Amino acid sequence: MLTRMRLLRGATALLYIGPLLAGFCGFGWGMVAPFVAVFVVWLMVLRPEQWPATPDEWLTGPAWLAALTQVLSQVLLVSVLFAIGRGFGGIAGYLPMVSPYVPLTLSIVAIPISRVLWDSREAADQGYFLDDEAAEAHAPRALVEAGAAIVPLLNMPDNAKDADISAAIEQSLDVVAPEVRLSALAAALERPARSHAALRRGLLLWSSEPEVVAPGHVPNAMALSFAFAGNDPDLLRLYTPRALALIAAFPNRASGFPSPEILRSAAAAASGPDSPSDLPRHLLDDLRDGLVALSKAVEKALGAASEANAAEAMPQGSEVRAAGQT
């Protein structure tokens, strides 16, 4: 998909070359209208989220206003490109003798090429967006699809085998940006209809894997792992040593861990007198000590990151002060 995005830039350049070449060749401003039509069609193909999706939406005033805004923006863009081309032609003092269909065809060809390279819906399903505006436009549908994707996981029995849970998790979260589905799972497990013990364990193991934490593609992976563990001492005993190893190996990912305050609170609750666990006291004490040690490790890593950021900013400030003194 990343390769497609790069190729898409080339197709976009082809789209822009058309009016530039038309202006360079000295064609009249009457060529602006067909180029605007081409640019609008290209927008409809590449960014359908910016246009009304149903006939009923087209009948509303806001839809017409949004469409008019899009068209006027393309009129301005084509006019600027056309003027730049005419300026280049005037500077060069040479006007190529080509058919007016040549620059127009260059822009038209960009439409099918862009459509072949990019499907906004398919790209959104994989977590790729052209810009923040596209990501925001696809957000509601992404949430709906995330909810549908996690239903099979929530329906798995508590006594499911680890192999079956792992396979289901891999199938559901095998996307470029799984954080939306993970967040939906975390929200669903906050007030579960049942314990979801097997699912919690599988999700904890998946989101605390080094392959997930190290690249940072899921920035809050370890915080989500902690959320999946909930108040279950058995899951927390599984989580704690993995988290300690990960914070030691990847301190630069400390911001994705639970905060030290949350960890200390969990430590106090795990071994407190109101703990519902039937684990022996020495195991609860070990869990408390492990969570306290993890809170200190996260706090230390966050402090080191803050100091590093301050050290990077300090030379710039020193240079500014030195310049002011001179």
Image: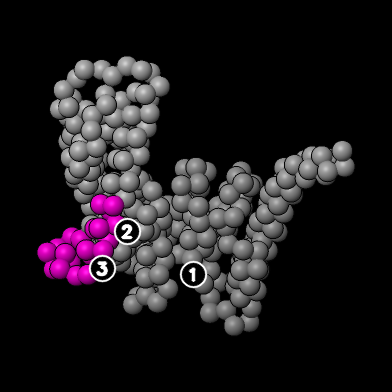
Q: Is 191 above or below relative to 147?
A: below
Residue flagged by tag 2: what amino acid is it? Answer: Ala
Residue at 12 percent of width and 64 percent of height: 55
Residue flagged by tag 3: what amino acid is it? Answer: Pro
Q: Is residue 158 left or right of residue 221?
A: left
Residue 205, position in %: x, y?
A: 45, 54
Q: Which residues are magenta?
A: 52-72
Q: Is 242 above or below relative to 52?
A: above
Dot 3 crowding, Cα within 10 Å, few <14, some 14–19, many 20+: few
Dot 1 crowding, Cα within 10 Å, few <14, some 14–19, many 20+: some
Q: Quadrant of residue 7?
A: top left
Residue flagged by tag 1: what amino acid is it? Answer: Gly
Residue 317, position in %: x, y?
A: 77, 45
Residue 129 on the magenta span:
no
Say whether disc 3 or disc 2 marks the residue closer to the N-terminus. Answer: 3
User: In the rendered picture of this protein, how many numbered marks are placed on residues?
Assistant: 3
Mark 3 or mark 2, whichever is nearer to me: 3
Residue at 20 percent of width and 42 percent of height: 33
Residue at 70 percent of width and 52 percent of height: 306
Q: From the image, which quarter does the N terminus lie in?
A: top left
Q: Is residue 163 left or right of residue 41?
A: right
Q: Can you tell which mark lies on residue 249?
A: none
Say whether disc 2 or disc 1 marks the residue closer to the N-terminus. Answer: 2
Residue identifier under label 3: 62
Residue 318 seen in the figure: no
Residue 156, position in %: x, y?
A: 28, 64
Mark 3 or mark 1, whichever is nearer to me: 3
